[in-house]
Amino acid sequence: MKVSIITVCYNSAGTIRDTIESVFLQDHSNIEYILVDGGSKDGTQAIIESYGDRISRFVSEPDKGLYDAMNKGVALATGDVIGVLNSDDFYESATSVSSVVKAFKRRPESDAVFGDVVFVDAPNLQTVTRFYRGNRFAPWKMRFGWMPPHPATYIRKSAYQKVGSYSLKYTISADYEFFVRLFMVHRLKYSYLDKVLVRMRSGGASTAGLKSSLRLNMEIVDACRTNGVYTNLPMLLLKLPFKLYELRKRPKDNA
């Protein structure tokens, strides 16, 4: 099974090397690695170019934001399965991708496979600050703000062809809107993999404070309603106790 991994970046010189190296450490032999850069000015391009032809495809040009860059990567991907690894994230272990491949082989009817992620804070990347599990996900919960962890989700190329691209209408939650189409509109099948796949540095656009959280939830309401799924802000607030629990919960190896 050929797996395409897409990393989109912009001025990511401080973290991009960790991301790239974690891809090269994977023990799965058939990986296509695509990097889409938005025209960085801080040396990111030079770091990427230093890897030469170990990078399958590298595009550097202005874009319309994160999800426009993801769409470019998906369009370039030739793998059977596509995953997105953000430029400040890295794989938890060398078996992250091969575990996903095994999950698809166990459940060949699955259009998507997702696992778990942990959040960490620099400079100590070994200290887990939040454990985001995908095991509680069910499509009906999307109206309450639940979604699988995007950086730990792998989707068949054929599913992208059915569902379409990420919407540029949303600045933070286009991945959420995509999952609404994937699981609630098209009702495609998925499998959960009980394994931490990715470590995420805290501080991304969707976790950057109260103002960002409000915008995220407003976009989620719109994303659901645009696709014929009813929700509202009070319904989304019902997930807050579970989010607080994630701050205390740890993976078994990090207990």
Image: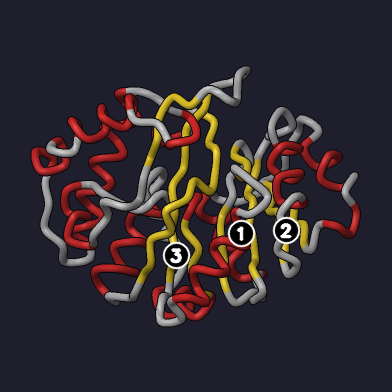
Is there CB contact under 8 Å for labels 3 and 2?
no
- Classify the position of the C terminus by image quarter: top left
Report the residue marked by disc 1. Answer: 97
Please state which of residues 79 and 127 is positioned toward the viewer in this rendering: 127
Element on which disc 3 rests: strand
Q: Which mark is residue 113?
A: 3
Q: Which label's residue is closer to the chain start, 3 or 2?
A: 2
Instruction: Point out residue 250 in the picture as x, y percentages from the top left corner.
Output: 40, 31
Using the numbered discs, state the Cα–Cα distance from disc 1 to disc 3 in whole angstroms.
Answer: 11 Å
How many numbered discs, if any?
A: 3
Element on which disc 1 rests: helix
Residue at screen point 64% across, 74% down: 79
* Above or below 63: residue 199: above
Is there CB contact under 8 Å for labels 2 and 1?
yes
* Above or below 76: residue 230: above
**Type of amino acid at the residue the image marks with label 2:** Asp
Q: Position of 126 compared to 162: left or right?
A: right
User: Badge 2, how many Cα within 10 Å: few under 14, some, many 20+?
Assistant: some
Q: Which label's residue is closer to the chain start, 2 or 1?
A: 2
Of badges 3 and 2, nearer the viewer stands 2
**Type of amino acid at the residue the image marks with label 3:** Val
Q: Which mark is residue 239?
A: none
Report the residue marked by disc 2. Answer: 27
- Classify the position of the N terminus by image quarter: bottom right
Residue at screen point 62% across, 41% down: 90
